[in-house]
Image (cartoon, grey):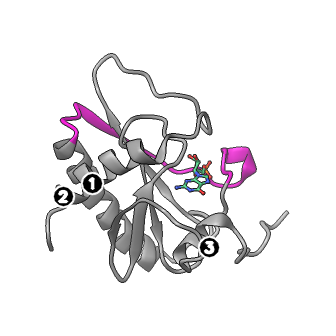
Amino acid sequence: MPAPAYDETNIFAKILRGELPCHKVYEDDVALAFMDIMPRADGHVLVLPKSPARNILDADPAILGLLIARVQKIALAIKSALAADGITILQYSEPAGGQIVFHLHFHVLPRWKGVELRSHTGVLEKPEVLEVFRAKIAAAIKPD
Ligand code: 5GP
């Protein structure tokens, strides 16, 4: 069964078009990174390509190559800004793979020894809390 085509009405497409707000951490010509509103860890960031792709299964490999370099940039900033012991990268594709929003994105999660991840799509975080983490992470991003 082929996957449905990319749907321009998904929530991340609306954020990319500026129709909905986000707590933006980073943006360039390839990618946008912002805070997850239901974070599984403090400082949970999503990194997505600006070009349309439903998930990793239909993404242009050339874009994926560029995108993973942005994922690394954000991971380094998060680790440094939040004194994380490690980083977990997650990517869900298709409903059976756990995907909920159908615009390709990578989750970048800071990890600390002994701290478990919270549940996927748990509790909405307060905007002022997201802003604190956004500002710390954005300030730690190394210029190109
Ligand atoms: P996934 O598709 O990777 O399974 O899950 C989508 C992720 O997007 C979840 O972690 C969820 O908390 C997050 N999310 C859903 N809607 C929004 C939104 O409107 N804004 C932001 N920043 N994150 C969202």
Residue drawn at x 71%, y 75% as measured from the top left: 6
Instruction: Say whether residue 99 is magenta.
Output: yes
Q: Position of residue 34 (x, y in %)?
A: 42, 59
Q: Which residue is mark 3?
A: 14
Question: Which numbered disc covers residue 105?
Answer: none
- State the extent of the magenta-drawn residues as a range: 82-100
Q: Is residue 46 above or below residue 54?
A: above
Amino acid at pointer 3: Lys
Q: Are marks 1 and 3 in contact (CB under 8 Å)?
A: no
Q: CA distance from mark 1 to mark 3?
A: 23 Å
Q: Are marks 1 and 2 in contact (CB under 8 Å)?
A: yes
2 or 3: tag closer to the N-terminus: 3
Q: Residues within 10 Å of mark 3 (few under 14, many from 20)?
A: few
Question: Which numbered disc covers residue 135?
Answer: 1
Q: Residues within 10 Å of mark 2 (few under 14, many from 20)?
A: some
Q: Is residue 50 above or below residue 121?
A: below
Amino acid at pointer 2: Ala
Q: Position of residue 21 (x, y in %)?
A: 52, 66
Determine whether the residue tagged by mark 3 lies in a helix, strand or loop: helix
Residue drawn at x 31%, y 65% as measured from the top left: 70
Question: Which numbered disc covers residue 139?
Answer: 2
Residue drawn at x 58%, y 69% as measured from the top left: 20
